[in-house]
Image (spheres, helix red, strand yellow):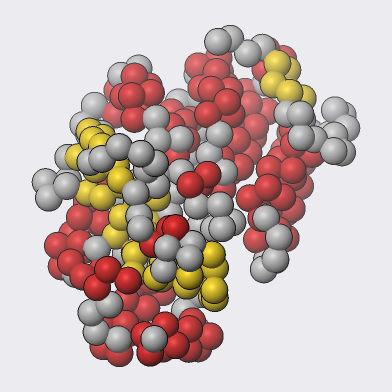
Amino acid sequence: MELGLLTCVAATDVAHSSESFESRFHAFRAEVANVLALREGNRRSEIRVAFDRQFATVDLPSLSSDDAGYFLRALADVTFHQPDADLTAVAMQVVLRHELTELQPFSGPRLVDQMLLGDRSFGGAAAWRARFSEFDDALLPQVERLNSGHHRMYTISEDGRHLLELDSHIATGDGLIVVGHPACGFSRAAAEWMRDQLGDTGTRLLWLAPVDGNLQLTMLLQWNRQFPSQAFAIARSSDDWQFIDTWDTPQFFWLAGGRIRERSAGWNEGSRALLRRFNAE
């Protein structure tokens, strides 16, 4: 669908059209930093409001290449925290309309590719990659469903070529969810401490990689082979994990009956104390 005009209905305080896109972009980034510094509230929703405040109405045909670049970066930022297929479609139009293929320090097609992967639109990502030579050697996994019903996450097949879509019993039951990633040094430190201090927690614990557009399947697969008792699944959608308001790593969610009993963010003494209490039960 061709969208000549983007209107974000959630806007509450539209930025003045006379302000440059560069200044609006930096104002948005400053708001995001303030939101992420908070520990309470729905940060994903507040980041979207910050985006709408600066970019509530954008006339795509009138954008200069520079303005389009700032707008595209803002789209990538807001969808990093909350994937949105409608905004991804707008980003695709921005790239194709302005041929934003070699903007520094980022590539327009790769930003859109990450947005499509964040949307879990693997078919859309394959079609998008077919338009650009820079994706010639990039492989996308095949997605398979292991069972019927609701699906909240993917596990990675042994060969790394398939994502197996399934549900988690912990998400609606009892156990501990660790939101982390092998690329995060604090996540690695937490995992090492848990191996040394807690031993094998079995099916009571889920290691969950965040929703984002950089799957890093090779890294996850290598980790899962090395540490099978701490193997990561990949979150399918933010909507499936409403109690996780941002995907910072590491975070720890102790659930009882599908509700948060305790939570802790970061690798610190508070998180270690939570883990000791959980392990003692």
State whether residue 31 is above or below residue 272.
Answer: above
State whether residue 2 is above or below residue 221.
Answer: above
Q: Residue at x 56, y 52 (%)?
A: 242
The reply to whether residue 107 is in sight is: no
Depth check: give the residue in front, 30 or 35. 35
Q: Residue at x 24, y 84 (%)?
A: 199
Q: Residue at x 54, y 58 (%)?
A: 244
Depth check: give the residue in front, 98 or 123. 123
Estimate the x, y position of residue 35 in percent, counting from the top left.
Answer: 70, 58
State whether residue 163 is above or below residue 197.
Answer: above
Q: Quadrant of residue 56?
A: top right
Furthest residue to the front? Answer: 257
Estimate the x, y position of residue 132 in percent, counting from the top left.
Answer: 34, 21
The C terminus sits in image quarter: bottom left
Number of callouts in the render? Answer: 0
Estimate the x, y position of residue 233 in percent, counting from the top left.
Answer: 31, 55
Estimate the x, y position of residue 238 in percent, counting from the top left.
Answer: 51, 47
State whether residue 89 is above or below residue 218.
Answer: above
Q: Tell me: 238 left or right of 25.
A: left
The reply to whether residue 146 is in sight is: yes
The N terminus sits in image quarter: top right
Q: Tell me: 129 left or right of 110.
A: left
Q: Residue at x 54, y 68 (%)?
A: 260
